[in-house]
Image (cartoon, rainbow, N blue to C red):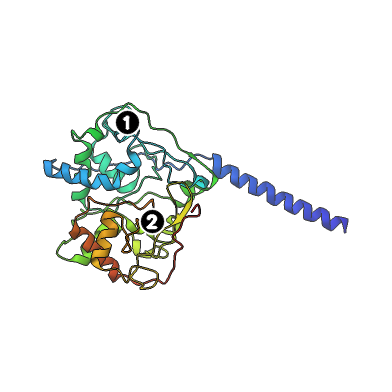
Amino acid sequence: MKKILKIVVYIFGAIAILAGAVAAYIQFAPAPVYGEQHIPEITFESTPEKVAEGARIASMLCNECHTGDDGRLSGKLLNDVPPAFGKFYSANITQDPDNGIGKWTDAELYYFLRTGLRQDGTFAAVMPQFPQVSDEDLFSIIAFLRSDERKVQPSEKPSQASAPALLGNMLLKFILKPSPYPEAPVPQPDTLDQIAWGRYLANGLYSCYDCHSASFTTNDRLIPENSKGFYGGGNELLDIDGNPIYSANLTPDRESGIGRYSERDFIQALKYGMRPDGAPLQYPMRPHTALTDNEVKAIFAYLRSIPPISHTVARASAGK
């Protein structure tokens, strides 16, 4: 009997040592580096129209995460990242040549926005990638970043290094990967095809599916429709007080999704942050007043076209 117990102790001891070694590797091994990148040249003409459109898009894609306490896109602590993943900071993306992107070429910015990779092969894993966004919209964002707009003027604030926890390191080293660079130009969607335009806006430009599918860890940025629980909600986010809150079901299910919403209801919710009953939407969902009514109508038409998922999400945050 003692011999059996001794063997059991040895087995559990070996398992504990192995688990500790794996955890130590995940936590302390360096992040993957993908080697020096060959970055193709790009050319585009910056116009006042591109700058204005880039500023509009950036107000919904970039400003929330990158606006620092100086009012510029100088980076900050990302409070919406659950503590289990660690502490993450957004980068300084102002025109400062030393602490921002002032020395980056247009081609490097375009490559980075597509793939998540810098010239030296380091990977910005927590930065969204935009493999499906049209060239025209990316050029508009770059034009804005190069513009005279105050938010992108040089800030000497250094970007702070992130401090991933064990779970965060697991994601960074084994799950989150760069996106492939497109082999051909990415065209603008046909805005006369309302559903196709809505798909582009929801899945490509604004990545609504990312929060509104089952989990960030099972989303498919190249084929969003393959994401687990596609638009069925339930992804864990954080409310304004840092408590867990779960994303809403945006499928056309009539009981648990938006199947009973009218087009006007959806415009009120997405643009102005108000439910059909007049109650405000909860953080982190914000009003998107920069969207045009036609964009919102296209997104609504697209969401009405996807398969319904019966999934009732408890919307109240744990702290309320």
State how many labels appear: 2
Q: Residue at x 33, y 68 (%)?
A: 258
Q: Is residue 184 above or below residue 85?
A: below
Q: How crowded is mark 1: few (under 14 residues within 10 Å), some or many (20 or more)?
A: few
Q: Residue furthest right?
A: 1
Q: Name the residue under label 2.
A: 211
Q: Mark 1 points at which residue?
A: 70
Q: Where is residue 117 in the image (x, y as percent from the top left)?
A: 35, 43
Whole-number angstrom distance, CA of label 2 to CA of label 1: 28 Å
Seen from the viewer's position, the closer of residues 155 and 128 is 155
Q: Where is residue 185 in the image (x, y as percent from the top left)?
A: 20, 53
- Under circle 1, the secondary element is loop
Q: Quadrant of residue 265?
A: bottom left
On screen, residue 197 versus residue 314, left or right, reads left
Whether residue 281 is visible, yes or no, is yes
Q: Residue furthest front?
A: 278
Q: Residue at x 18, y 50 (%)?
A: 136
Q: Quadrant of residue 77?
A: top left
Q: Where is residue 153 in the image (x, y as percent from the top left)?
A: 24, 31
Single out the mark in the foreground, 2 or 1: 1
Q: Where is residue 211 in the image (x, y as percent from the top left)?
A: 38, 56
Residue type marked 1: Asp
- Under circle 2, the secondary element is helix
On screen, residue 241 versus residue 266, left or right, reads right
